[in-house]
Image (cartoon, helix red, strand yellow):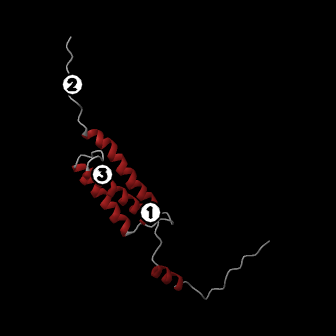
């Protein structure tokens, strides 16, 4: 009996099966971080995240190749730097000028609250 070779499966559904949940997890993570007092979603966070998605889109046009050629290596490095920058912008403190205005605008006429030790 002669065996016939079947054609290889189309890789597009497998890429979608991997990357769609990955992007959903990233977006859900940002959505869940909104109410956190330690995390600030700023314009810089959204810009760096959008740039990271843009780099992934360009890399997808190149075929998401393993970083062994110059273009995938560069796209891999840029995407990692943008991911770090996105995470870094989440935890940046407000500018000093914004902090001063909030401290100065507090009510200083109220008497101080003293803690009593029992």
Q: Are marks 3 and 2 in contact (CB under 8 Å)?
A: no
Q: CA–CA distance between discs 3 and 2? A: 33 Å
Q: Give percent across and percent down for residue 100.
A: 50, 83
Q: Quadrant of the C terminus?
A: bottom right
Vertical position of residue 45 compared to residue 66: above or below: below
Q: Residue furthest right?
A: 118
| Residue designated by label 1 | 34
Q: CA–CA distance between discs 1 and 3? A: 33 Å
Q: Give percent across and percent down for residue 31.
A: 41, 58
In front of the other: 68 or 18: 68
Q: Give percent across and percent down for residue 91.
A: 47, 66
| Secondary element at image label 1 | loop
Q: CA–CA distance between discs 1 and 2? A: 49 Å
Please tell me which residue is depicted at 33% across the width and 46% down the height of the picture.
19
Lower sequence index among marks 1 and 2:
2
- State the image quarter where residue 85 is shown: bottom left
Nearer mark to the viewer, of 1 and 2 = 2
In front of the other: 26 or 85: 85
Lower sequence index among marks 1 and 3:
1
| Residue designated by label 2 | 6
In front of the other: 79 or 96: 79
| Secondary element at image label 2 | loop
Q: Quadrant of the N terminus?
A: top left
- State the image quarter where residue 109 is shown: bottom right
Please tell me which residue is depicted at 26% across the width and 48% down the height of the picture.
69
Q: Residues within 10 Å of mark 1 (few under 14, many from 20)?
A: few
| Residue designated by label 3 | 73
| Secondary element at image label 3 | helix
Q: Residues within 10 Å of mark 2 (few under 14, many from 20)?
A: few
């Amino acid at each position: 009996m002669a065996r016939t070779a079947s054609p290889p499966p189309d890789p597009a559904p497998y890429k979608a099966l991997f990357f769609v949940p990955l992007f959903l997890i990233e977006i859900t993570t940002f959505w869940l971080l909104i109410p956190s007092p330690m995390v600030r979603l700023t314009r810089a966070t959204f810009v760096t995240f959008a740039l990271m998605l843009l780099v992934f889109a360009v890399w997808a046009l190149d075929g998401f190749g393993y970083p062994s050629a110059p273009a995938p290596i560069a796209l891999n490095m840029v995407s990692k730097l943008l991911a770090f920058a996105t995470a870094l912008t989440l935890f940046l403190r407000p500018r000093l000028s914004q902090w001063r205005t909030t401290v100065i605008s507090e009510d200083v006429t109220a008497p101080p609250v003293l803690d009593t030790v029992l």
